[in-house]
Image (cartoon, rainbow, N blue to C red):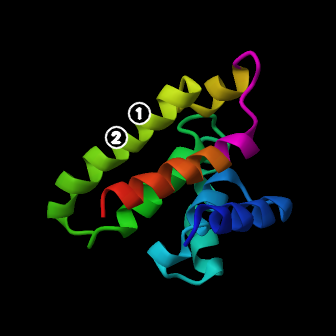
Amino acid sequence: MKPNERIEIANRLRAQGLNCSQCVAMAFPDIHKLPDEIMAKLSIGFGGGVGGQGEVCGVVSGMAIIEGFRSQGSAQDKRMVYPRVSNLSEIFKSKHGSIICRELKGMTPPRPCNDLILNGIEILHNFINETK
């Protein structure tokens, strides 16, 4: 899939009221290969910084979900997935100053969720292409 196709998916989902984690995770159907309703259920609890608590940004959680789908999910895969998710988090943090939702929203100026979603999709798309 092309980045603009992923952005289109995310914009449509956001317009429907889905959260940041859902928009990111659901923009990668070629990776997760799940029906939309299943991915929506899987990722809903990560919005707003894990259940609206302001913790890890839902965009970062959505990226972590998709990175997990690039593995077999075995205990051995943690050695591959953890560094990749850490790398994605660092890339996101370097661009936005934090991966913590309440910090991102409290910055001057605040980081709009829509911008974070689109940037997270771009980061993840490029990362996937670089680590095939």
Residue 109 vs 8, above or below: the answer is above
Residue sitting at x 71%, y 68%: 9
Three-letter code for the amino acid on which mark 1 is drawn: Glu
The crowd level at tag 1 (other Cα within 10 Å; few <14, some 14-19, many 20+) is: some
Q: Amino acid at mark 2?
A: Ser
Rendered residue at 76%/19% (across/down)? 109
Q: Locate residue 45, reporting x and y percent.
A: 60, 56
Give the class, few, some or many, for how many residues have Cα within 10 Å of label 2's Cα (few <14, many ≥20). Answer: few
Label 2, label 1: how far apart the Cα atoms are: 6 Å
Q: Is residue 116 highlighted in magenta? A: yes
Does residue 46 appear left or right of residue 52 in this picture? left
Residue at (28, 55) in percent of width and height: 81
> Does 114 lie within the magenta span?
yes
- Quick one: which residue is furthest to the top in this view? 108
Q: Say whether marks 2 and 1 touch (CB < 8 Å).
A: yes
Vertical relation: 19 (above or below) 93: below
**Can you say which quadrant of the picture contains the C terminus?**
bottom left
- Tell me the residue that label 1 is attached to: 90
Q: Which mark is residue 16?
A: none
Residue 78 position in % (x across, y down): 22, 56
Q: Residue 86: which numbered mark, if any?
A: 2
Residue 67 against residue 51 in the figure, above or below: below
Task: Name the one closer to the observer, 32 or 44.
Answer: 32
Q: Which residues are magenta?
A: 107-117
Quick one: which residue is furthest to the right in this view?
15
